[in-house]
Amino acid sequence: MSDPRIIGYLGRAITHEFSAAQQYLAQSRLVALWGMEAQSADFRKDAHEEMGHADLLIARMLHHGSVPGGSQLAPVRVGRSLADLLMQNRAMELDAIRLYEEAMIYCQRRRAMEDAQLFEHILNDEIAHVREIDAKMAELTGRGQASG
Ligand SMILES: [Fe+2]
Ligand SMILES: [Fe+2]
């Protein structure tokens, strides 16, 4: 029988991923309104990547004989500038990193290695997301300084 705590982590992770996808889709549309087409495409790509994570987690949930039932999505966090959005996203990605680290460590202890590997794989993607956000924030700051 599957460990209910692992099912719990999978459920929380699915809710996170759909919340992240909703946030990135909303921000993609918002920055398009601001005339930032390239950034809009970047956020859209991020949304699809988060949905890919949800897909992997759903597959794992079914493997355990459970039906995925993501619960209430987190409210979309926006702002008045691209810098605001990036800060919101950074906080969201850090929450995901904490969740995936905890889930991975628990699964490793329980010797649930396939679950641990999935959580580790997604964890590494979320760490990469934070690095991308940091690079973008640094670029924005650099531009701000360059323009005065
Ligand atoms: Fe994700
Ligand atoms: Fe992410």
Image (cartoon, grey):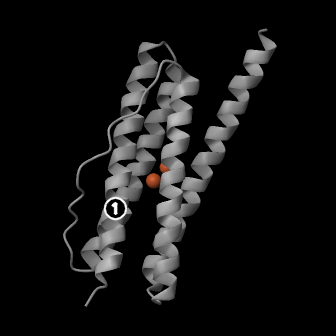
Type of amino acid at the residue the image marks with label 1:
Arg
The answer to which of 3 and 118 lies nearer the viewer is: 3
The answer to which of 32 and 104 lies nearer the viewer is: 104
Quadrant placement of the N terminus? bottom left
Residue at image position (42%, 36%) is: 24
- Indicate left or right for 88 with 64 as reference: right
Estimate the x, y position of residue 38 in percent, counting from the top left: 54, 24
Q: Which residue is mark 1?
A: 12
Q: Residues within 10 Å of mark 1 (few under 14, many from 20)?
A: some
> Where, by quadrant of the figure, is residue 77 drawn?
top left
Residue at image position (35%, 35%) is: 76
The answer to which of 56 and 76 lies nearer the viewer is: 76
**Considering only vertical position in the picture, is 32 above or below 123?**
above
> Where, by quadrant of the figure, is residue 55 drawn?
bottom left
Estimate the x, y position of residue 16 in percent, counting from the top left: 37, 53
Residue lying at the far top in this picture: please name it.
148
Residue at image position (33%, 73%) is: 60
Asked which secondary structure carries label 1, the reply is: helix
Estimate the x, y position of residue 134 in percent, counting from the top left: 67, 39
Estimate the x, y position of residue 67 in percent, counting from the top left: 19, 69
- Indicate left or right for 100 with 17 as reference: right
Q: Is mark 1 within 8 Å of ligand 1?
A: no
- Indicate left or right for 69 with 110 as reference: left
Residue at image position (68%, 24%) is: 140
- Indicate left or right for 114 with 76 as reference: right
**Number of marks:** 1
Quadrant placement of the C terminus? top right
